[in-house]
Amino acid sequence: MQALVLVNPGSPQPLALQTRPVPQPRAGEAVVRLHAAALNHRDLMLLQGVRSTEWAPYTPGSDGAGVVVAVGEGVTDRRQGDAVVINPALYCGRCRYCLSGEHSLCDRFEILGGPADGTFAQYVRVPAGNLALKPEHLDFTQAAALPLALGTAWRALVSRAALRPGETVLIHGIGGGVALYCLQIAVALGARVLVTSGAAAKLQRAQALGAAAGIDYRQEDVARRVRELTGGAGVDLTVDSGGRQTLPVSLAATRKGGRIVHFGGTTGTEATLNFRTLFWNQISLLGTTMNTQAEFDAALRFVENTRLQPCISATFPLAEAAAAFAAMEQAAQFGKLVLQID
C-alpha cells in the first residue's frame, strides 16, 4: 500500500510517500481501506517535531473514513463492506477511568496517528470498537472531516459546558475545524453565537452559518465588544482553544457565574491570568480533551439528525499532502483540509 511516512520530523521535508505492507487485523481489530483523511493541527505539530522524533518513522493522521476490508478474531459488531468513520481516541479499556466510561481520561490515552500508524495511507488498522457507521447523507470526504474536531467540539459544548438553549457563546478563532463544529452545534442547539477572527471574510462566512455577530480581534477590543453585544453582562460560555493570548480575553468577556471551556493552546500553553476576576466573578474554567466512545456516537447521531454538513476548505491527493500542510500553516482555511486517497 501507499503511505505517507513521517521520516524527518522538524525538517523542511518531513514526509515521504512509501510502499508499506497492508496491515492485518489482530484480535478485536479491523482494517479499513481509507477513501479520505483529514488534517488536524496536531498533525502539523508532529511534522514540526513536537513529541514525534521518538516515534518516527511512522504514518501520521488521526481522521479517516473508508470501508472495512477485514476483521480480527472476536469482532462481531463490524463486518467487511461497512462504510465507517474512525474515532481516533485510543483507550486501554482497563484502567479505572475506562471502566467508569471516562475514556478520555484513560491512563494510557493515545491519539491515532502517533505513535500508532494513522490514516495518511491506503489502509489503517484500528480497534473495531473505534469504528462507527458513516452518516448516510455524507460522502467519504465529508465524513473524514468529522472525527477529532467533531468529538472535541461535542464534549466541550455538551458534556463539559452543558450548553443550554438561549445562552450566548463566544468562540475564538473561527475558521478552524473545532471552532466551526462548535458554531454549528451551538446554533443547532438554540444558542446565540459570537465569533472572532482576524479575517473579515471568515467572519462573514461564519455569520452565514448562523453566528449572530463577528468580531475582528485585529481591529477591536474583543472583551469590550462582547460586553456591548450582551448589554454589559458578558457571554454565558466562552470556547477557548488559543491559550496564552485568548484566555485573559475570555475571562474579561465571560459573565459572572459563566463558564470557559478550554482545550488546545494554539497561541501558547502558558498564560498570565487575573485570578481576582476568576474567583470574584465565580467563573468556571473547564478543561476538556477529545471524547469518549459514547460521546463520539452521540455526536454522529446529532450529525445525522440535523443533517449537518461539514465545512471543507480544500481537498488534496495523498501525494500532495505537503501542499495541504502549507495551507494549514498559513491559517487561511475555513473548514477542514482533506486528503483524498482513492
Image (spheres, helix red, strand yellow):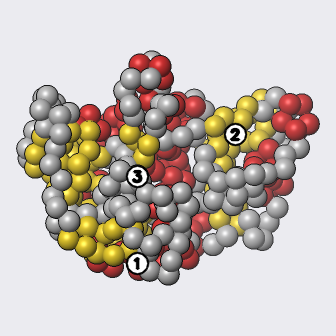
Amino acid type of the residue tagged 2 in the rendering: Ile
- Mark 2 or 3, nearer chain start: 3
Compare residues 330 and 22 and report the one nearer the observer.
22
Mark 2: secondary structure? strand
Compare residues 329 and 10 and report the one nearer the observer.
10
Q: Which mark is residue 81?
A: none
Where is 47 relative to 97, above or below? below
User: Residue 84: percent from the left, percent from the top?
Assistant: 21, 46
Q: Which mark is residue 260?
A: 2
Near mark 3 (Cα within 10 A), the count class, few <14, some 14-19 or many ≥20, is some
Mark 3: secondary structure? loop
Q: Which quadrant of the structure image shows residue 28?
A: top left
User: Residue 53: percent from the left, percent from the top?
Assistant: 49, 62
- Mark 2 or 1, nearer chain start: 2
Badge nearest the viewer, 2 or 3: 3
Tell me the CA gap for discs 2 and 1: 35 Å
Badge nearest the viewer, 1 or 3: 3
Amino acid type of the residue tagged 1 in the rendering: Ala
Q: Which mark is residue 322?
A: 1
User: Residue 229: percent from the left, percent from the top?
Assistant: 75, 50
Q: Is residue 165 left or right of residue 91?
A: right
Q: Which residue is under mark 3?
A: 115
Near mark 1 (Cα within 10 A), the count class, few <14, some 14-19 or many ≥20, is some
